[in-house]
Amino acid sequence: MNAPAIQGQVVAIHGVVKVIDAQGHERILKAGDIIQPGEHVVLLDGATLTVSRAGGDSITVDGPRDLALTDETLMPQSTDKSEAAVAKLAPEAQQVLAALENGQDPLAQLDSAAAGLNAGGAADEGSHGFVRLVRISETLNSISLDSSATTEVVVPTVQGDTFSTTPAPVAAAATTPISVSIDNISATNNATPTIHGTGIPGLTVVVSNAAGAVIGSAVVGSDGNWQLTPSSPLPDGTDTLIATSTNAAGTSASATGTAIIDTTPPATPTVTIAEHNDPNGVIGAGDLVNGKVEATVKLDATDLAKNGSATIVVNDGGHITTLVVHSDGSVTGADGTVSSSYSNGTVTISMTPPAQDAAVTITATQTDAVGNTSGQGSDSGTLDTVAPSAPTVVIATDANHDGIINKAEQGSATTDTVNIGLPSDAKAGDTLNVTINGVAQAGHVLTAAEISAGQVVITPTAPA
């Protein structure tokens, strides 16, 4: 029958438990993992680990603790019966002890040769042994034994015994204490922040995440401080960071910290100037509210409430006003030309109309608590609240312009030609409204080509 492999298997685990192999590689333990002799198991505060050993039983340890795994740790040790047997005393020693117990002179119980050298012989030349028995303040027969003195009895060794001169082992010098700490990193939009902490000068600190991936390492300086920059960006969210330091004796210390990373900006604000969705961005008289140009800016209310802010720049015909929306919903920066209010993520802006044909432009950005800034939202329009001059109408079919289209003028044509002259203040995007024989026609939006030509030509059906 083959001996079981000397290894252990994790059967239960609670909290953060790491293992460091002989090459210094570190990983986070999970249920079912195999651990080997020579590895170090590091249990953080509050952690518990249960390991099934090679012999079939299990052991449970709790943290904080650093455990060096050996063959003896992972394989229960049995004791041979012969090792557990009690060795018998030599007959001469039994005689001495019996004499002392009975109040007799122990010297009288020995053979005369026993007090000499080499009594009983020795297996090896130069090998000697003796037992020193000391009895103090014993009341015995004063004739055979002086009870007030210290009595020394030399008892021959059992043949084959040797006298060892090997000094007792000296306890190893205490190893340098080991400790490590890591500072938490508050919310930041820097995915490679400086990670720092304290430790034992000269030792290396390895920082890993909860999955066991190494983020970086640093040597503790003479002042007891260390710092490092992650070798790759940390993911967004709350990351668990584990700092581990190991001394020359293999003893490890660990500490846990957190880093909050946020590199996601708020959504781009939506800016809308009230212009009735005019495709050319014309702000007409009908778009004004109580004589004011109005606009709305929609923000991310959640990001704003988390210590965020928004900046809105209003260019009202060349008059610049900068509004700042704060996390509490207050808006600052309004002046006599522009006013504003905030409610549930929407900023409502009201402004004095600029001069006729002047442009209105509004831009907005939003910034979250850690400094991420959104894209820029914007909208613009041109004020046009004055009606253009009246167009002119010429029926080209009425050749003599007498107001009557005769048969000769009409000829065989079934339509008439009408030229509508455009006024000089007409603009592309203006709507031309035409009524024929008392019937209003669909509005016609003027094009740039028509403005350039100065007229619009229509061909209504000739009357019967």
Image (tube, rainbow, N blue to C red):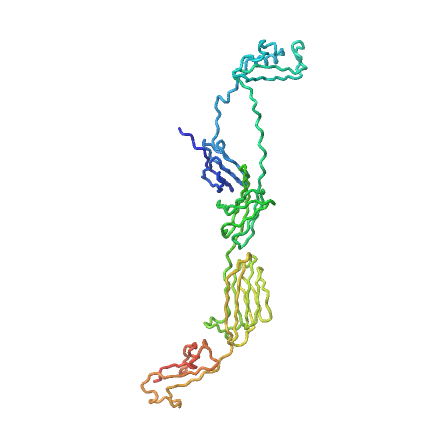
Q: Position of residue 188 (x, y in %)?
A: 54, 54
> Residue 372: percent from the left, percent from the top?
53, 58
The C terminus lies in which quarter of the figure? bottom left
Image location of residue 150, percent across then percent down? 65, 16
Residue at 51% across, 20% down: 85
Q: Nearer the viewer, residue 74 or 446?
A: 74
Residue 417: image location, x then y, percent: 37, 84
Tell me which corner region of the image, top left, top right, bottom left or bottom right, holds residue 219: top right
Relative to 276, is 196 on the left or the right? right
The answer to whether 425 appears left or right of 148 in the picture is left
Query: Number of marks in the image?
Result: 0
- Say which of 141 and 301 sits in front: 141
Quadrant occupied by the N terminus: top left
351 or 108: nearer the eye?
Answer: 108
In this view, 317 is above or below 107: below
Q: Is residue 256 above or below residue 284?
A: above
Taking 313 as reference, is 216 above or below it? above
Vertically, is 364 above or below 226? below
The extreme left residue here reads 412
Residue 399: image quadrant is bottom left
